[in-house]
Amino acid sequence: MTMSARAAARTPGDSGHIDPLHHVQCLPADAPLALAWQQAASAIRARLAPWPDARTTAQWRLHAQVPPGGFAKGDVFWWPLTPQGALDTGTSVQIDVWRAAGAVVLCSRALPRGGVEDTLYADGEIYRVAGVDDPAFFPAFAAFLDCGFAPHDALVLGRAWRTDGSHARAEDADALGDWPTVLATFPEVVGQVPSPGEFPACPARLGLYPVLPDADWCERMADLQVGTVQLRVKDPAHPALTSEIARTVAAGKRVTHDSAWFINDHWREAARANAYGVHLGQEDMAALSAAEVETLHASGMRLGISTHGYYEILAAHHFRPSYLAVGAVFPTTTKVITTAPQGLAKLARYVKLISPHYPLVAIGGIDAQNLPQVLETGVGCTAVVRAVTEAADVAVAVKGMQTEFAKRA
């Protein structure tokens, strides 16, 4: 057993009654290491305040040793390595076999000065982060899996956890328990192109944020003096794309107070039109070369990036954007999203983590009916689509939603 694995097994638990984990088993159940993981994870889970238990939460089996029958879907194996450790050819082949069987494999490599680099193999993807090695890491990872987080999100939450409690804020304890809300304790996503520096700032609370399909709609928002708007023309071959962007940029300049108008995806065309800002999806941002990110930064435009969970939030944070968007909060039909809806409990925790550093935009399935619930999380901006484009009276709908924001100004 490595030093890191032994330390994780020694993580102290609560001496009082602790509810067992509902969705995670540490195996073999009679093995001292697995038993220690299970007890420590249960203790951490109990410190996370009330958390909604979804029926659809995956079931996980965390193995302290390779099971005799091999791995299958739902199995998780942690392979801590020495400081100079690296996977030899035989081990790499073995990991590929386990991955093909549906298992999740986590390899950790010690770095100087208490650091650690993790490589997570899950669902056909590879995730890499670097952070601080804490003795409570693996039980914390198990606790967040039990909360229903995907392995890559549970990984970064587990790495954020600190035995000394520095990952949480005392003022959040009543509502969130010891939930990690201090961004400085989270690991960094590695393997991305270099960040050229911070992008220009935009208003801290962007308010109502209609995302609209064409310049006609955007011009209607200018007539209503809506401060934050996004033009979302998904077809890069749209015959009037340049004109649509130019009209939208011109319309945004007619807004006299806190105008922050963005163009979705088409950042080169937006830069040529002197747009205020652009919004890119997670995949679009990841597809940019280092030179393209430099060019985007040099344009002076604001940058918003979409995210769908903790790992993607950290990937976007690497580029120091102007704002972060997270979703989908609720089920939505306006865009195909492979991740499950985030829900209000996650959104409230994202607000605590992100808002001290970036404006946060909630997106996905938000309308006039659920807007008050969304704003109760403390988020300062909500993107809406059908709540505007399908409204019986657009002006009334916009005014009503803006009034909800004004109540919490």
Image: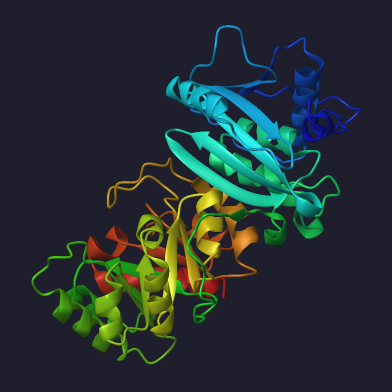
Q: Is residue 243 left or right of residue 87?
A: left
- Which of the two residues, 239 or 171, is positioned nearer the viewer here? 239
- Which of the two residues, 15 or 75, is positioned nearer the viewer here? 75
Q: Which residue appears at 43% of the width and 64% of the height?
A: 305
Q: Which of the image's four quarters has the N terminus?
A: top right
Q: Give the tally of numbered discs.
A: 0
Q: Is residue 385 left or right of residue 9?
A: left
Q: Which residue appears at 28% of the width and 76% of the height?
A: 268
Residue 47 at what x, y percent from top left? Answer: 77, 39
Q: Is residue 170 left or right of residue 389?
A: right
Query: In this rendering, does residue 117 appear at all?
Result: yes
Residue 24 at what x, y percent from top left? Answer: 64, 23
Vertical order, 223 against 161 (above or below): below
Residue 134 at what x, y percent from top left? Answer: 79, 44
* Quarter of the figure with residue 304: bottom left
* Quarter of the figure with residue 280: bottom left
